Image (cartoon, rainbow, N blue to C red):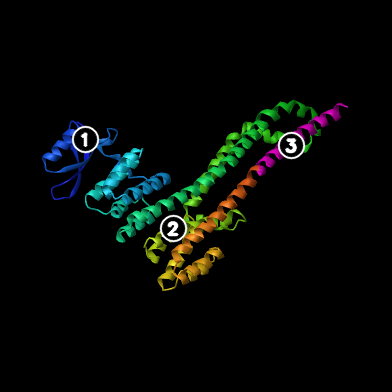
Amino acid sequence: MPRFRYVAVEPSSATVEGLLEAVSRAAVVDRLRAAGSIPIRVDEVSRLSPAGIDLGNIFGARAVSPRTLALMTSQLATLLQAGLAIDEALSILIDLLEKPRDQACLRTLRDRVSGGATLSAAMAEQEKVFPDFYVSMIRAGEAGATLDTVLAGLAEFLERSRAAREHVKSALLYPLVVAATSCVSIGVLFVFVVPRFRPLFEQAGDALPLPARALLIVSDGLAKDWWIGCLVALVGAMLLRRQFKNPSSRRGWERRLLKLPLVGDILRKSEVVRFSRTLGTLLKNGVSLLPALTITRQTMSNLVFRDAVSTVIEKVTTGKGLSGPIAEAKIFPMIATHLIRVGEESGRQDDMLLKIADILEGDTRRSIDRMLALLTPTLTIVLGVIVAGVIGSILTAVLSVYDLAM
């Protein structure tokens, strides 16, 4: 007999969950109503689950995509501004989403809110779905009775962050296609084209020029021992991944990357944009400085910057302001340090942080565009040089054979 997992509200207004065996979902609903409970959700447990265990509870909820989270936040803000209650707005959003996983996430939120929990508390229970800064801003909006305004600001923040990521992905697409095409072209050249000239090269014997000999060695290596190259690449990727899983090794790699001429500047500005926008958004929505810094630190992907923010938090805890510890960290750009000091002195720290994010985001985007604009012709030139070298080596070998024949 099928088993169903249910969520229901008892006469005492408490929310309960459990499993029931019944012939159908309707039978479960009838049994719950007969017991005086109000069924909220009844789902059949998958038959693929061993012993009837709900695998979703074992593996837990997964984070929704950035696009879905931004869209959901924007729509929820609009519905609340229209005067709807939170549970009603969540019920409407469930119908608007397409993926069952996202619908289940919102359904759980609605059930918890209907049971008397706050929206922030319900989101905090799904820690793998909603980021800490997101929950903290929702909590601040609830405390200040400005939840719709906070959600609108969150939606803008998430959309801008997503747009920045999409811009980088779109800009990288064409160079990646060019790089892949170049690798395939070079592979075809060495594996299929060069071997056809082997009889000609063998006629030259010891008189074969050094470039042509090197060409044959590379061609033979790619044709016969290609699997060794793939194995080396795979082992290298595994070792690199292991290095990045080790915090101390990862910190060393990231410190070296930050020192690179062009890439380091882009990485530095990207982290400062994330820091400034997250901290500014939290402060603007009522979160105090120390909790906001703690939450912001968790959003930093670069361990060097995360360590710097940890040091800033320690100094702010002793009573120092934000601008002094930021300047002492010596990792933030000068413009960020000066504008934070101006915002601190004028009492508009949140606005200045958001202004820093806007300025550096524009600089980062222009730097990325310039770097990618140079990357494509560079790849084309490298491919041209390799092809020209191969053709030159073949011509040199042909001339050598011609000289021998003469």
Mark 1: secondary structure: strand
Q: Which numbered circle lies on residue 3?
A: 1
Question: Which quadrant, please, contains the C terminus?
Answer: top right
Q: Residue at x 18, y 33 (%)?
A: 26
Task: Tell me residue 50's x, y (percent).
Answer: 27, 36
Mark 2 to mark 3 CA distance (whole Å): 50 Å
Q: Where does label 2 land, which residue? A: 278
Residue 85 in view of the camera: yes
Residue stretch rendered in magenta on the structure: 377-406
Q: Earlier in the sequence, mark 2 or mark 1?
A: 1
Q: Is residue 294 visible?
A: no
Label 2 secondary element: helix
Q: Disc 2 versus disc 1: distance between alpha carbons?
A: 44 Å
Q: Residue at x 63, y 46 (%)?
A: 373
Q: Amino acid at mark 2?
A: Thr
* Overall secondary structure of the magenta section: helix
Residue 22 at x, y percent in the picture: 17, 33
